[in-house]
């Protein structure tokens, strides 16, 4: 395809890292996972990292950890404030733990949660806020952090789409939450085949995450953990289960590749931002398209476009033109989650006057890819194709 939605970012270093694991004979979670966890946490200035097999699993064990916290557990029926646009597995763990989603509309230009609606959305049942920085563009995480501190709420960041993004202050996205999740899927900012991680500064949450990652088992938990008191029988303690956990452990191969990819992340982000600058230059001010307004410094997962409803453009005609030009495109993240069949299984409410901006992005939006290499020919062709399509 002339302009792909996603492309590989590996080089010989990643292949060599895989080969080293094969030669070692140790494939399941071990020293390489621990090394990568420490490296990734240090890159973000956080104390602890817990790697798992996907960003979705990172969200799952994060909600599980909050559900079993010793003093502030999330309980069935508790309410979590969420944005109306995100990927499905932002929300699924909330449903699976009996939590109620309270949806807040997004800003049409940033596609992130509209923080001006937070205070009005708060109810007596609200216990947490789950922030999502959409497609590389950091949301107003500092405002959200202050809101949660003010009201005694848990604050969790799903940063699976926005690794290496920065707030206007320079602080990285994925560092302000009590828990912060990332994804290492093929199309994301770094790729370990499959994989994800949770970052935190909280010791109890860290131990809960490690326990939930591996069967609810004590094996990865130190004996002085706040989670339990070790008994006298070594025979029993070797296979002691504390919580109803999972097996979402990563592989040594994934971590070995992650260490190599992390070295390349600053350069790959710089390449994405260079492409973003060209996209913004070519499309800024075009009233046919609403493009994502950058808040802070985006790490530019992709380029989003919403057809301006005032222009009455035919999205199917534009899609046909993109297909003809061999340009890949897709829905913005997962679109408005309220529009999916799975919502019938949820306990939820909608804050304020509905989610018109999320609905508009769902019905009139799409994105094309951004990659960590020069995309000048692709972006310039995109401009010409869309000019012709809307003429």
Image: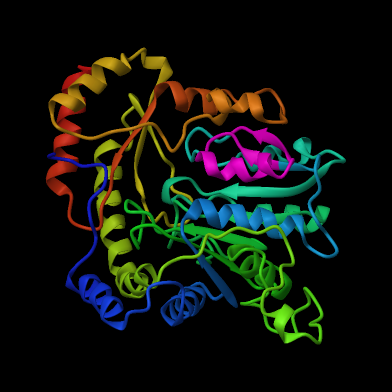
Observer-nearest of 193 and 312: 193
Q: How is the image coloured?
A: rainbow
Residue 363: image quadrant is top left
* Residue at 12 percent of width and 40 percent of height: 2
Residue 298: % across, % down: 41, 54
Residue 124: % across, % down: 87, 41
Indicate whether 142 appears above or below 307. below
Specify the quadrant that holds the C terminus: top left
Total numbered labels placed on residues in the image:
0
Indicate whether 351 appears above or below 37. above
Does the magenta-highlighted stretch encompass residue 103? yes
* Residue at 77 percent of width and 36 percent of height: 120
* Residue at 64 percent of width and 48 percent of height: 130
> Can residue 142 be seen?
no
> Can residue 140 be seen?
yes
Observer-nearest of 337 and 167: 337
Name the side, left or right, on which 221 lies relative to 190.
Answer: right
Observer-nearest of 176 and 259: 259
Q: Which residues are magenta?
A: 81-105
Residue 302: % across, % down: 33, 45
Name the side, left or right, on which 63 lies relative to 187.
Answer: right
Specify the quadrant that holds the N terminus: top left
Indicate whether 257 appears above or below 275. below
Does the magenta-highlighted stretch encompass residue 46? no
Residue 231: image quadrant is bottom right
Residue 159: % across, % down: 51, 55
* Residue at 30 percent of width and 49 percent of height: 276
As drawn, which residue projects farthest toward the front?
A: 235
């Amino acid at each position: 395809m002339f302009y792909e939605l996603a492309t590989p970012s590996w080089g010989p270093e990643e292949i060599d890292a895989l080969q080293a694991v094969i030669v070692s004979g140790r494939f399941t979670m071990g020293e390489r996972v621990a090394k990568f966890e420490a490296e990734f946490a240090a890159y973000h200035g956080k104390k602890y990292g817990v790697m798992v097999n996907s960003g979705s699993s990172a969200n799952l064990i994060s909600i599980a950890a909050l559900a079993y916290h010793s003093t502030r557990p999330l309980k069935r029926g508790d309410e979590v404030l969420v944005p109306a646009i995100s990927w499905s597995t932002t929300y699924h763990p909330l449903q699976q733990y009996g939590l109620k989603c309270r949806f807040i509309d997004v800003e049409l230009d940033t596609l992130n949660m509209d923080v001006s609606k937070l205070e009005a959305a708060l109810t007596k049942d609200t216990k947490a806020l789950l922030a999502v920085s959409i497609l590389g563009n950091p949301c107003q995480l500092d405002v959200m952090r202050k809101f949660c501190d003010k009201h005694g709420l848990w604050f969790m960041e799903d940063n699976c789409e926005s690794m290496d993004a920065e707030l206007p202050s320079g602080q990285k996205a994925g560092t302000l939450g009590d828990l912060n999740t990332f994804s290492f899927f093929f199309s994301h900012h770094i790729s370990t085949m499959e994989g994800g991680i949770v970052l935190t500064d909280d010791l109890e949450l860290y131990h809960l995450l490690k326990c939930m990652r591996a069967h609810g088992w004590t094996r990865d938990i130190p004996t002085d953990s706040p989670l339990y008191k070790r008994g006298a029988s070594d025979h029993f303690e070797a296979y002691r289960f504390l919580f109803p956990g999972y097996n979402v452990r990563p592989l040594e191969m994934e971590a070995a590749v992650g260490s190599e990819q992390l070295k390349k992340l600053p350069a790959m982000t710089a390449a994405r931002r260079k492409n973003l600058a060209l996209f913004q230059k070519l499309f800024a001010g075009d009233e046919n398209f609403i493009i994502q307004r950058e808040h802070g410094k985006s790490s530019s997962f992709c380029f989003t476009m919403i057809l301006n409803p005032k222009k009455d453009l035919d999205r199917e005609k534009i899609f046909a033109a993109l297909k003809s030009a061999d340009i890949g495109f897709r829905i913005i993240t997962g679109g408005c989650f309220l529009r999916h069949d799975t919502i019938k299984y949820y306990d939820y409410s909608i804050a304020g006057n509905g989610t018109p901006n999320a609905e508009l992005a769902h019905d009139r939006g799409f994105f094309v890819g951004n990659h960590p290499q020069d995309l000048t020919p692709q972006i310039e062709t995109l401009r010409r194709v869309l000019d012709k399509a809307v003429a």
